Image (cartoon, rainbow, N blue to C red):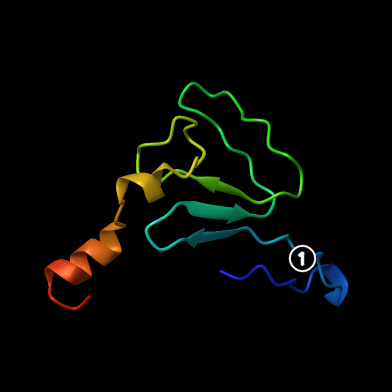
Amino acid sequence: MSNQGEAGVGGAETPQVPAVTITVRENGPFRVEGPVRLIDANGNEFQLPAGKPFSLCRCGGSTKKPFCDGTHSRIGFQGAERAVLEAEGQG
């Protein structure tokens, strides 16, 4: 699926939808850039600063969940993709 504008009625191009990018940082958090809504398990929306990227915890150790607080660096977190490669002797 593309976020590029598509021809609309009468051949006019519809506006492009801003892209959201989620980057998996090596042995670190998910970095989220773009306009998103973040909702907790109870349906409550987190207030996010408009236009500012943020990081989501992937190691499970953050004291500011769901946001990253850098704990992954202190505990030696290895992302699953790296751990699998090393276990298979490819990393």
72, 48: nearer the viewer? 72
Specify the quadrant that holds the C terminus.
bottom left
Specify the quadrant that holds the N terminus.
bottom right
**Residue at the image position 42 percent from the left and 55 percent from the top:** 28
**Residue at the image position 81 percent from the left and 64 percent from the top:** 15
Q: Pinpoint residue 70: horizontal percent, then vertical percent.
A: 47, 45
Residue under pointer 1 = 16
Secondary structure state at the residue bearing disc 1: loop
Pick out the residue farthest to the front.
74
Q: Quadrant of residue 26?
A: bottom left
Which three-letter amino acid code belongs to the residue tagged 1? Gln
**Residue at the image position 83 percent from the left and 72 percent from the top:** 13
Query: Is 85 left or right of 56, judged from the image as shown?
Result: left
- Mark 1, other Cα within 10 Å: few <14 / some 14–19 / many ≥20: few
26, 70: nearer the viewer? 70
**Residue at the image position 58 percent from the left and 37 percent from the top:** 38
Q: Pinpoint residue 42: horizontal percent, then vertical percent.
A: 49, 21
Pick out the residue farthest to the left.
88
77, 85: nearer the viewer? 77
